[in-house]
């Protein structure tokens, strides 16, 4: 995923599944990272975006598995609302169930490392 980070200032991932990928990608390319929450947590900082400030930054959004890309697109919207520019969305695995089409329809660049055909799974 680091191969797609050249034009990004920050690596971000939606909470839970993509946090480890975002952290590993950020470490591999020497860039800061952020976690995008679905909802504000009362017991934490109360922020939707934890970590690096993304305002006026170019952000690579990484996600573990793309089915319809709903969660990734929500995270992209949260980042955009915070003042970030999304460089692209990169998925570790594309399940080929609409993620690519939905990401592109939302005006973002889509990349996947592998898809279900590569893995020979249905």
Image: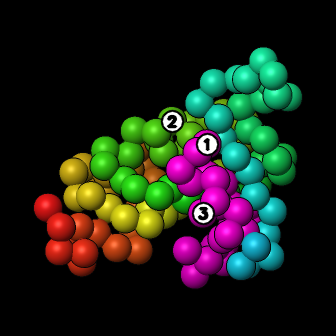
The number of numbered badges drawn on the structure is: 3
- Regarding mark 2 in the picture, which secondary structure is present there? helix
Q: Is 96 left, or right, of 10 in this rendering? A: left
Marked residue nearer the N-terminal end (1 or 2): 1
Q: Is 117 left, or right, of 8 in this rendering? A: left
Is 104 within the magenta?
A: no
Crowding at mark 3 (Cα within 10 Å: few <14, some 14-19, many 20+): many
Mark-to-mark CA distance, 1 and 2:
11 Å
Mark-to-mark CA distance, 1 and 3:
11 Å
Determine if residue 96 is in view.
yes
Nearer to me, 19 or 91 = 19
Image quadrant assignment for residue 82: top right
Q: Which residue is mark 3?
A: 21
Residue 18 in picture, x, y percent from top left: 56, 54
Q: Which residue is mark 1?
A: 15
Q: Residue at x 59, y 30 (%)?
A: 38
- 63 over 80 or under it: above or below: below
Residue 95 in picture, x, y percent from top left: 27, 58
Q: Which residues are magenta?
A: 1-26
Q: Residue at x 62, y 77 (%)?
A: 2
Q: Nearer the viewer, mark 2 or mark 3?
A: 3
Marked residue nearer the N-terminal end (2 or 3): 3
Crowding at mark 1 (Cα within 10 Å: few <14, some 14-19, many 20+): many
Q: Which residue is mark 2?
A: 74
Image quadrant assignment for residue 121: bottom left
Residue 6 in picture, x, y percent from top left: 66, 78
């Amino acid at each position: 995923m680091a191969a797609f980070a050249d034009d990004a200032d920050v690596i971000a991932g939606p909470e839970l599944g993509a946090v480890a990928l975002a952290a590993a990608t950020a470490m591999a390319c020497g860039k800061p990272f952020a976690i995008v929450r679905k909802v504000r947590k009362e017991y934490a900082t109360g922020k939707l975006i934890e970590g690096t400030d993304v305002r006026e930054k170019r952000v690579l959004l990484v996600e573990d598995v793309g089915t319809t890309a709903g969660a990734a697109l929500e995270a992209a919207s949260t980042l955009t609302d915070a003042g970030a520019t999304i460089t692209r969305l990169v998925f570790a695995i594309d399940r080929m169930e609409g993620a690519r089409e939905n990401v592109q329809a939302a005006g973002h660049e889509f990349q996947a490392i592998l898809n279900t055909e590569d893995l020979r799974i249905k």
